Amino acid sequence: MLVFGASSVALSGSAYAQQDDLWYPGEGVRQDMYVTYRIQELDTADGDPYVMTLYFKEQQDGDWIVPAAVQHGNNVITGIMKLSDGMSYLAGGSQVPAEMNDFIGGYQGSLHWLDAFTTKSAPLSLTAGSWGKIAAIGGEEIRPRGVEKVAFEGAQDLCQADSCDATLVMWHKGVDNKIWIVNGFPFPVRADTFAEDATGSEVTQFRFELLETGTGEPPGLSGSGAAQKPPIEKRTHSGYYIRLEWTPEEIQPNNDVSLGISMFDAQKFPLLDVRYDLTIKDSSGQVIQELKNQVAELGTATHQVNFNGTGTMMVTVTITAFGGQTTGQFVEGADFGIVVVPEFPVSAAMVAAAVIGLVVIITRTRGTSIGSSLFGNKGTASP
């Protein structure tokens, strides 16, 4: 898990003591602070949890320049997000790789979700009787329910205790949905919310928890992510599983790669008579291979692929039917990021360059102690 140590001092809980009871996303954000959250959102990364760090580096014309890092499994993605003073994501001015967009959508659908009710231009009170209703969800109104102690991993950083005083914002549909807000902190510190799937069962809509907050730029906000090793397994919207593996493990451009796909039900039994689509995109998001209506009678299939470029390739497997039945309105699919490495890695190039440079030095200094000690020259070289 990608959790950064504070490079300066932890943020004091007293820094967020507020004289009023108004709150909105972005309240209390300050230059040089960072936050790290564990986030799980229904439509992001097939509902898998991921860790996101945001560092509020500076403001430009009222907007925040925010170096960001996302860790999903073994893969780390970095970029620079641009956020409004109300924490809305601004695509214009942001510099993020294509594979980061899904996780930014998860940020918008979780940490920033309450912006639909309370904003910097029209903040609501944490003691108000109601914050409104969600037409698409129904049920009770969204209401602040008073202050209570809430435990979360980053509580020590925020209030120097195992739990913090936070306002509980709640609504009910089937089960209680809860979001906890520390007044003056720019995002809620914890949330547990739910939605119904096609069978009427409760599934997580979004869930998050503050892991860490502090001042100073945390490490790990630049550089490329580490490549995941096969196999990778993802859960679909309705609880099916798709597994991707490949050989050779290290993928190089212009070499044949065997992609193996396996599909399972919720109990990990193979799906039978599967129809699926396979799409592969390069690191710029361009489709390089697309196969429709593929058949896997026993739930497994193999495809041969040859990648021309390098970088993170996105392999998308979408189940369209199995057992003679379509998947209906829900998309039962998974995205897999796999890395194609250069044929001549940078590290090898640096070593080669160093060796070449050393040979040049030795050639130019023949007869010196350097040449003799390195090559065991016992004689005297001619000038």
Image: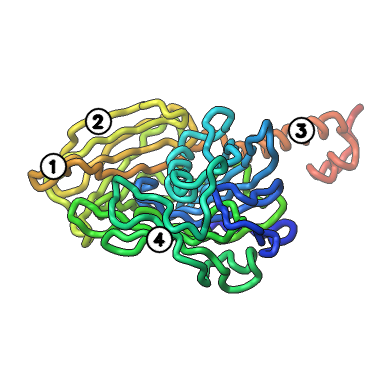
Q: Secondary structure at mark 4?
A: strand
Q: Secondary structure at mark 1?
A: strand
Q: Is residue 82 visible?
A: yes
Which of discs 2 and 1 lies nearer the camera? The answer is 1
Task: From the viewer's side, name the closer residue of 256 and 55.
Answer: 55
360 on left or right of 251: right
Question: Around disc 1, counting alpha carbons within 10 Å, would you say few (fewer than 14), some (14 to 19), or many (20 or more)?
Answer: few
- In primary-sequence order, the first of circles 1 and 4 is 4
Label pair 4/3, CB-CB below 8 angstroms: no
Residue wearing tag 3: 357
The residues tagged by marks 4 and 3 sit, at their Cα atoms, a distance apart of 66 Å
Asked which quadrant contains residue 140, the reply is bottom left
Of the numbered discs in the image, which one, if any, rests on residue 326? 1
Asked which quadrant contains residue 59, the reply is top right
Rendered location of residue 40, percent (x, y)? 41, 54
What's under tag 4, amino acid-wise? Answer: Met
Q: Quadrant of the C terminus?
A: top right
Of the numbered discs in the image, which one, if any, rests on residue 291? 2
- In primary-sequence order, the first of circles 4 and 3 is 4
What's under tag 1, amino acid-wise? Answer: Thr
- In primary-sequence order, the first of circles 2 and 4 is 4
Of the numbered discs in the image, which one, if any, rests on residue 364? none
Of the numbered discs in the image, which one, if any, rests on residue 170? 4
Question: Around disc 2, counting alpha carbons within 10 Å, would you say few (fewer than 14), some (14 to 19), or many (20 or more)?
Answer: few
- Residue at 33% in and 51% down: 234
- Residue at 44% in and 58% down: 129
